[in-house]
Amino acid sequence: MEPHPIRLVVTDDLRRSRLTVFFRLLLSLPHIVWLLLWTVVVVFAAFVAWIAALVVGRLPDPFHRFLSAYVRYGTHVAAYLFLAGNPFPGFVGRAGSYPVDLEVAPPAPQSRWSIFFRPILGIPALLLAGAFSGSTSSGGGGGTIGTAGFLGWFASLVRGRMPEGLRGLLAYSIRYVAQTYGYLFLLTSRYPDADPAEPVLERPLDHPIRLVAEGDLRRSRLTVLFRLLLYLPHAVWLLLWGIAVFFAAIANWFVALVRGRPAAPLHRFLAAYVRYATHVSAFLYLVANPFPGFTGRPGSYPVELVIGEPERQSRWVTGFRLLLALPAFLLLSALNAAFGISAILAWFHSLVLGRTRPGLRGLGSYALRYAGQVYAYLLLLTSRYPHSAPPA
């Protein structure tokens, strides 16, 4: 598939000025005010551009330049406010002027039917973009962008550097939001791409907990329709198994504190549970199609969590593992909101067409991988902290 006409280009070096990080919200106020004023004009310009595009079958060049600059400027401001970038951005949205920049392809002919129904066609993408930005997150949370920015604020103040994983998640989330508004503003006829496979990292990361997603995109309409009902036996078994896991985790914690490494039998038991939970979640959220088994056996499901052998771990890190895992769980909660919306969209899509979208499956695989790493870290299956960036 050809690259998306709206692409995010990241040249940021992760270094952050502690002084500007501390006052980041205050420094962003002029941009927030200017963005609000610009938005008022854009609402009217977008309506006029919609009518003009219906007449000529494409977005006229002046409107394309104006709306592209607005979406690009919004991207610059979001990157600065939430610490995906460090320099203070300009006020005009000039291309190439910021280390987290947006490339927008020139205007191209578009179907008038697609243009006419664009406000309706864009609703699913808006729902998912809202989960990233926080506007559709449960409990009024800040979405992945707000949560990653909040955690990045503390990390950058302490280290003078933005964690690569948080910057990667921010770049992915901001990119999808930008593509959504680019689609709504007729900058492109290409639908926003939720697949995180486009690299936002400079290098792939070697984590002992990784996800292998195989299988095609076909989905059985019958099992999709009754997916929640089919999940019920697994829900009961997960609950019963979870009770045993609770006591096994406590025992494993004491063993790791004394020996400096988890017990091999407990490691296998806990790994099977985390692997099984991944299989069940992949089935429930339509990341995979087959009905999973009940044992969490390695290699038994198309969406597989690969877990390494027991390793030596720091006793200090083990002792404070529950406290150290709290930021990861906070980020997982925000990512799960987007995962839940993507599953609902995949349900409707699969029910109608008998297959899911690659982007929705990619987002689901990403969320499952991060969840697996979070629970593996909490249960002492690894000492490596969960990495929140999309896969490179």
Image (tube, helix red, strand yellow):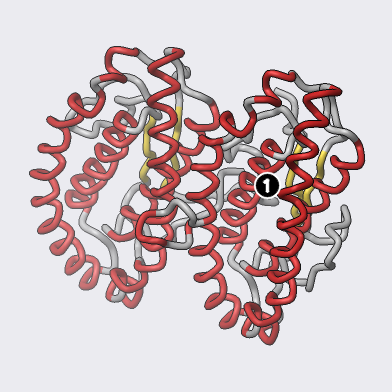
Count of numbered marks: 1
Left or right: 249 in relation to 65: left
Residue 166 picture quarter: bottom right
How far across and how far down the image is residue 104, in percent?
81, 41
Question: Is 98 situated above or below 350?
Answer: below
Q: Secondary structure at mark 1?
A: helix
Q: In front: 174, or 258?
A: 174
Left or right: 238 in relation to 73: left
Residue 377 picture quarter: bottom left
Residue 385 picture quarter: bottom left
Look at mark 1 in the image and give the residue it sits on.
178
Q: In front: 318, or 279?
A: 279
Q: Which residue is at the far right?
A: 62
Quadrant housing the N terminus: top right
Q: In front: 239, or 392?
A: 239
Name the residue located 73 percent from the left edge and 40 percent from the top edge: 47
How far across and how far down the image is residue 174, in percent?
63, 52
Q: Which residue is at the far bottom?
A: 19
Q: Is residue 12 visible?
A: no
User: Badge 1: how crowded within 10 Å, few (<14), some, or many (20+)?
Assistant: many
How far across and how far down the image is residue 257, in percent?
23, 72
Give the amino acid type for the residue marked by disc 1 in the picture.
Answer: Ala
How far across and how far down the image is residue 223, in percent?
27, 17
